[in-house]
Structure formats: C-alpha cells, structure tokens
Image (tube, rainbow, N blue to C red):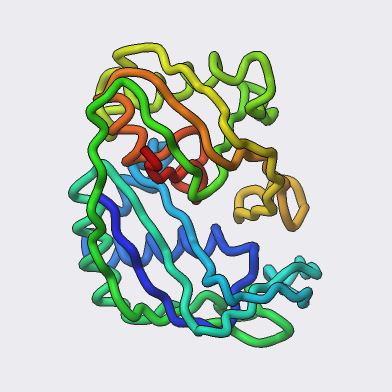
Amino acid sequence: MRVRIVLKTDEMPLLYRHRIISLIKEALMRSDKDYKEFLYDGKITKPFTFSLMFPRTKEFVNKKVIINRNFEIEDKVALIKDGFVSLFISSSDYRFMISLFTGLKKIGSFDFSYGDCMLVDGKSINLEVKSISVLNEKVINNNFAVFKTMSPIVLEDKDDKPIIFLDDNFEKELNEIMDRILRSQIIRGFGLKRHLEFEPIKMSKQVIKHTLKDFREKTGKPIMYITGNTGIFKLSGDAEDLNMLYKIGIGNRTGQGFGMLEILK
C-alpha cells in the first residue's frame, strides 16, 4: 500500500529526513501509541519507506540552517513557489498505513521547526497536511521488473562502509541485506525465495546529507554524508520477493527515507 501526502510549505531544507521521521512518529503516536512504541523501541526493522518530492518549479538557495542549539550550517534550501511538496510513503504493513493515515488526519499540521531547532535563517517552518490519497499499487507478475529510484538506495557493509552499484560485491551484499530484512517477523518471517540479479541501466552515485539525534550525540558532528545509488535498473528474482521489495523499499535505512522505488515496467 502506498499513499501520497500533500504538504503545504514555502520552503524546505534538503536536510529534512529526520523531521519527516518525526512526523511519522507523531502520526503513529496520535492513532496507535502501542504500535508506535513497538516500532521505535529498539532496532526493529521498519516496514516502510518514503520519498519527499519537490515540484519542478522549486529553486535552491543557500541559507543558514540551525539544526539545534549546538549546530548551525550553511546548506541548500528549496524555495517552493507552488507552496506544496509531496510525501510518498509505501509499506507492506496494513496496521502501519492505517495508523499513519488516521494520525495524519488528527495532526492537521506539523512543526518542522521546534523550539530553536531546524530554523531557516532564524525562521520556523510548519507543514500543513492538505490531502492524503491512496495510490494504485502495480503488481509484478514476472520474474523481473524495471525500477526507478524515488529515493537513493543505500547499501552498507558490516563496517557501515557504503557499497555502490559499480562495486563487485554490490549484488552479493544486496541479497544478504534483503534476505535478512525479509526474515524479520514484522516484514515477512522468511528470506528471499530466489537470488536477486541486479542490472544497472542508468545509475549514478549520489551523496546525501543526513542527520539523526543519536549520530550528533555520538560523534559531535552536525551531519553525516551517506553514499547512495540512484537511477534506473532491472531487478530479477521471484515475483513474490519483487513485490515485497516494491512495497518496503530496498537496501539499508529504508525507514529513514531511502530505497523507495517506482515500477517503470
């Protein structure tokens, strides 16, 4: 199941993923507190992925972004001339999507900026939920599909080092990561039914700025740099596996807004 949430705002920092996570948490808390606490109590695999899309008329400018009282950076901010951005969320978990949908209806609006945190040139940003619509999901009936990334695919090895699509071990690591994720009881309870074959069609490397509270507290740094893979690729495997990956995203950090896919054919 996937939804599109239209949010009203005049600007949006590129350093947004941690606040979208907070929006999702707030929505779950409003509608299903027990489920929210279960999902975010410890390192539980998240059964969803998301992507924030800017309108074509956006313009990027450099502005001062105050992450919190300890960190301030100069970074790109999208000026939203049309006044709206689209948040796409996909999940295999019906309870998650119903709770999210209900919670967002209750919220109405969300403080992207809070206190003296995530201010842009000293000003706060508020996100108003204008609409929520359920999208038609495509169904994969073959043993392959051509995908386009809606958010970069992140693969990291056991030492948290990035793996890009040109690396010899990319396909091997992809299979190991997705097999492990699918074995989670909240996802499916068993691993891949067939080996995944990854064929890049038009792929490129992308470096993304990201921040999380735990990262800042642990490292004393304001942001992390994540290396991702973006573009168009062909993925072959079992149709049931491919449909599940389409719903939950692929790679690491899907619950942080990475690895969301759309089907081209």
Does residue 156 appear to the left or right of 143 in the view shown? Answer: right
Residue 43: x and y in percent read 44, 37
Q: List x then y, in percent, for residue 9.
A: 50, 82
Q: Residue drawn 42% across and 34% down?
A: 146
Q: Position of residue 224 (x, y in %)?
A: 71, 48
69 over 206 or under it: above or below: below
Q: How many numbered marks are there?
A: 0
Residue depicted at 29% across the width and 14% down the height? 193
Looking at the rendering, in which quadrant would you find the C terminus?
top left
| Towards the viewer: 223 or 205 | 205
Q: Image height check: is 77 above or below 15?
A: below
Q: Residue furthest bottom?
A: 123
Q: Residue at x 51, y 40 (%)?
A: 253
Q: Where does residue 113 sit, x and y in percent of width and height?
A: 56, 77
In the image, residue 112 above or below residue 88 = below
Q: Quadrant of residue 13?
A: bottom right
Question: Does residue 168 lie above or below 43 as drawn?
Answer: above
